[in-house]
Amino acid sequence: MANIKSAKKRAIQSEARRVRNVARRSAMRTQVKKFLKTVGTGDIAASTDVFRQTASILDKSARKGLIHANKAARTKSRLNKKIKLLVLKEKEKTASASA
């Protein structure tokens, strides 16, 4: 442990930030898993709603410095691609059913 008062204060601040970041990172990852689970059900409307929430959390994490902005953008892009695949599969089903 540090001896200088300012160093002690910094250690306390760093620990508080670490705990806060762990909670935020966990919430972010949980939200991504929730989205993936929703996509797995095949419900496009629910997936879109959860995607909006997930994108918001990813953007907030990037803004707070928890993750890099490019990582947030890359993750959102990959998640959005899953919704697009879901919509495409749905269109193929309706096209093959009507043909």
Image (spheres, grey):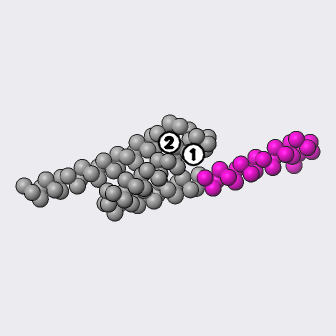
* Three-letter residue code for mark 2: Ala
Kind of element beneath mark 1: helix
Question: What secondary structure characterizes most of the magenta part?
Answer: helix
As for residue 10 lying within the magenta part, the answer is: yes
Mark 1 = which residue? 61
Residue found at the very far top of the displayed protein: 70
**Residue drawn 9% across the image and 57% down it:** 98
Q: Is residue 93 above or below residue 80?
A: below
Coordinates of residue 15 in the picture (x, y in percent): 75, 50
Magenta region: which residues? 1-24
**Residue drawn 45% across the image and 59% down it:** 34
For the residues labelled 2 and 1, say whether their Cβ atoms are less than 8 Å apart. yes
Q: Does residue 82 appear left or right of residue 56 in this picture?
A: left
Mark 2 = which residue? 72
Instruction: Tell me the quarter of the image containing the C terminus.
Output: bottom left
> Label 1: how many residues lie within 10 Å, few (<14), some (14-19) or many (20+)?
many
> Label 2: how many residues lie within 10 Å, few (<14), some (14-19) or many (20+)?
many
Coordinates of residue 63 in the picture (x, y in percent): 58, 40
**Residue drawn 29% across the image and 53% down it:** 86
